[in-house]
Image (cartoon, helix red, strand yellow):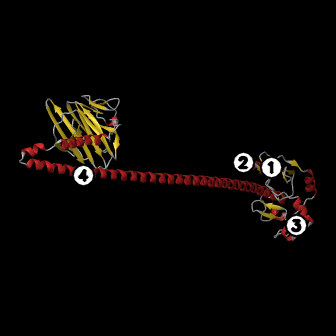
């Protein structure tokens, strides 16, 4: 037992043999100089050094201190492996002690085998030499395995670090998604409030419109009554009675109605309407700096290419209307031809159906004057309807989107209704203008 304990104390943990030139690391563990030098050389490329015994780590290559006492003890106590029987040391053929190792047959042999036996002429070595060579191979294998184990441990550490990073990123993404969903929920709640508020507002507007319609119906009933009185007077044969009937009440009523029409139109006046979509203007057109006036230059200009540009001398307003009631006024030139109206933004830009009124996406009033002849018409979906001539240079345009009504007025005194289009609008509407040898201005 004491011999086994002493052997353990004198055995290198790397090569598992008695120490040869033992050295000690700073952590206190000892190894053969060649064994520990090989391990440290293998660790050098990783930038860190560890003790094979206790795994103590250092960034710099540890100094190797010669252990003289341990070396003296190892030199004085040459231990051999115990054997249970001498038969293991005898040649099975010649019954002599095994002394050599046949390198070609990889077998332990005796002297007779080497000189006269079947191993005669083969390359042989002493058992100690062969044993040392095999131990050297085993040390090299052990060194490689040690390096592989260290690489595996380093890979495990890297994977652990990667797992920590993934967990950290997952936590961050989870927090971001939670915050995003919370923000979306808040925006949806705010949108819900706005939509409900808009519904309430529109409900109130509809109620007011219904009340206004009821009031207008009452006015119509009054007109019907007065018309009945007038018809009755017209049927009378008594001239005195007819002449004594007062007309002031009827005149005042008609004047009041005329003022009401003018007032009802102007309260929805559009303050900011312009021909701001210059990229839609045809090549013949010139738009003023304040975007309020468009005129015909008489010839094509070199404008930048744009998919939204009209082939014909037309231009759209920058503002569009998708709800509500709106009114604006325009002033025209007394000569040439010009058109004003409303259109969907999806109207074609080229071809026969790109002109306003020549498709189901636009509604227009056209005025053409040459010499002393004037032509006035309204056009939609290529259907043209002639209307009475106009003398005033200013026109009013009234849009009631929800009611699907687009009306044109001549701003003379009194105001004269020209025409009203009715439709179920499905897209936002832009004001649209076309001029040829003329000009038009938004007031």
Quadrant of the image occupied by residue 270: top left
- Residue in the foreground of this view, choosing between 52 and 77: 52
Q: Residues within 10 Å of mark 3 (few under 14, many from 20)?
A: few
Gap between marks 2 and 3 measured at Cα = 41 Å
Decide which of tag 4 and tag 1 comes sooner along the chain. 1
Q: Distance between the residues labelled 3 and 1?
A: 30 Å
Mark 2 or mark 1: whose residue is earlier in sequence: 1
The secondary element bearing badge 4 is classed as helix
For residue 411, side relative to residue 41 (left or right): left
Residue 414 visible to an observer of this rendering: yes
Query: Which mark is nearer the camera, 2 or 1?
Result: 2
The residue at which mark 2 appears reads as 46
Query: Toward the viewer: 290 or 381?
Result: 290
Q: Which of marks 3 and 1 is nearer the N terminus?
A: 1
State how far apart marks 4 and 2 are (Cα).
99 Å
Residue 24 in percent (x, y) is at 86, 51
Indicate the secondary structure of the residue bearing disc 3: loop
Residue 144 point in image, percent of width and height? 73, 54
Which of the two marks, 3 or 1, is nearer to us in this view?
1
Label drawn at residue 37: 1
| Alpha-carbon span between mark 4 and mark 1 | 114 Å
Kindly check if marks 3 and 4 are in contact, taking CB atoms under 8 A apart as contact. no
Label annotation for residue 82: 3
Q: Which of 182 and 150 is in front in this view?
A: 182
Give the residue at mark 4: 218
């Amino acid at each position: 037992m004491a011999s086994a304990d002493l052997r353990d104390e004198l055995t290198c943990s790397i090569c598992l043999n008695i120490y040869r030139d033992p050295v000690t690391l700073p952590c206190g563990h000892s190894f053969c100089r060649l064994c520990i030098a090989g391990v440290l050389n293998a660790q050098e490329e990783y930038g860190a050094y560890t003790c094979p015994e206790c795994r103590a780590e250092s960034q710099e290559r540890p100094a190797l201190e010669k252990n003289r006492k341990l070396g003296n003890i190892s030199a004085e106590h040459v231990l051999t492996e115990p054997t249970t029987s001498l038969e293991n040391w005898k040649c099975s053929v010649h019954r002599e002690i095994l002394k050599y190792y046949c390198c070609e047959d990889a077998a332990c042999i005796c002297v007779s085998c080497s000189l006269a036996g079947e191993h005669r002429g083969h390359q042989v070595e002493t058992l100690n030499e062969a044993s040392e060579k095999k131990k050297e191979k085993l040390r090299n294998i052990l060194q490689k395995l040690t390096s592989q184990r260290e690489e595996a441990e380093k890979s495990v550490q890297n994977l652990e670090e990667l797992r920590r990073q993934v967990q950290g990123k997952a936590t961050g993404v989870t927090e971001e998604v939670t915050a995003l969903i919370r923000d979306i929920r808040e925006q949806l709640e705010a949108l819900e409030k706005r939509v409900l508020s808009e519904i309430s507002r529109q409900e109130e507007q509809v109620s007011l419109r219904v009340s206004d319609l009821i009031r207008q119906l009452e006015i119509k009933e009054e007109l019907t009554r007065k018309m009945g009185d007038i018809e009755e007077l017209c049927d009378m044969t008594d001239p005195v009675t007819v002449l004594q009937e007062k007309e002031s009440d009827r005149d005042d009523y008609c004047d009041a109605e005329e003022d009401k029409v003018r007032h009802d139109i102007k309260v929805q006046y559009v303050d900011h309407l312009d021909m701001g979509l210059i990229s839609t203007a045809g090549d013949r057109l010139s738009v003023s700096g304040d975007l309020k006036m468009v005129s015909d230059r008489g010839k094509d200009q070199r404008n930048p290419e744009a998919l939204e540009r009209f082939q014909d001398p037309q231009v759209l307003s920058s503002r569009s209307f998708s709800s509500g009631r709106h009114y604006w006024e325009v002033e025209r030139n007394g000569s040439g031809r010009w058109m004003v109206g409303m259109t969907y933004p999806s109207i074609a830009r080229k071809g026969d159906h790109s002109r306003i009124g020549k498709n189901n996406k636009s509604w227009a009033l056209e005025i053409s004057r040459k010499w002393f002849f004037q032509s006035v018409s309204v056009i939609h979906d290529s259907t043209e309807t002639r209307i009475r001539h106009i003398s005033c240079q200013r026109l009013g345009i009234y849009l009631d989107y929800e009611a699907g009504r687009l009306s044109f007025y001549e701003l003379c005194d009194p105001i004269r209704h020209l025409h009203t289009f009715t439709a179920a609008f499905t897209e936002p509407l832009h004001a649209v203008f076309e001029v040829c040898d003329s000009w038009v201005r938004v007031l």
